[in-house]
Image (spheres, rainbow, N blue to C red):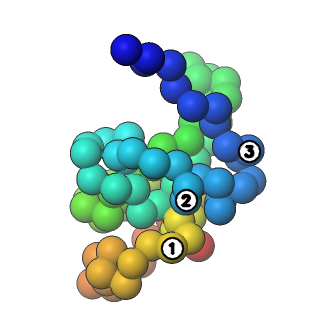
């Protein structure tokens, strides 16, 4: 069984990130946003996460506190985007 991971897309290539097949980083659901956590003293490099709508929605305040960048993945269905409409806007909005 091959357990190797496919190569990571370039950091700025959202189309390639949208083409990533498989579940989000947080659960078996499909990802709807790409989150980039900025470097910290303990982690001196940015970290990419692919989050499902539910885990993005419940994490928005913490992501904003961490100054994370959040980008909606291209091709996300309207149903998934609706998850964000009833959530108050915090400093880490979907771009």
32 displayed left or right of 69: left
Q: Circle 2 is placed at which residue position?
A: 18
- Distance CA(mark 3)–CA(mark 1): 18 Å
Q: Circle 3 is placed at which residue position?
A: 10
Question: Which comes sooner in the sequence, label 2 or label 1?
Answer: 2
Would residue 23 be seen by someone viewing this image from the given angle? yes
Q: Residues within 10 Å of mark 1 (few under 14, many from 20)?
A: few
Residue 19 place in picture, x, y as percent: 56, 56
Residue 61 place in picture, x, y as percent: 36, 59
- Distance CA(mark 2)–CA(mark 1): 7 Å
Question: Which comes sooner in the sequence, label 3 or label 1?
Answer: 3
> Which element carries disc 2, helix, strand or loop?
helix
Q: Quadrant of residue 44?
A: top right
Q: Circle 1 is placed at which residue position?
A: 75
Q: Nearer the viewer, residue 75 or 54?
A: 75
Callout 3 touching callout 1 (CB < 8 Å) = no
Q: Quadrant of residue 1?
A: top left
Callout 2 touching callout 1 (CB < 8 Å) = yes
Vertical relation: 33 (above or below) 21: below
């Amino acid at each position: 069984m091959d357990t190797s991971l496919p190569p990571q897309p370039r950091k700025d290539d959202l189309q390639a990130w949208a083409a990533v097949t498989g579940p989000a980083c947080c659960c078996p659901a499909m990802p709807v946003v790409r989150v980039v956590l900025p470097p910290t003293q303990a982690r001196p490099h940015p970290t990419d996460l692919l989050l499902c709508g539910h885990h993005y929605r419940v994490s928005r305040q913490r992501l904003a506190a961490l100054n994370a960048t959040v980008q909606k993945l291209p091709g996300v269905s309207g149903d998934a985007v609706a998850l964000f409409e009833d959530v108050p806007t915090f400093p880490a909005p979907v771009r």
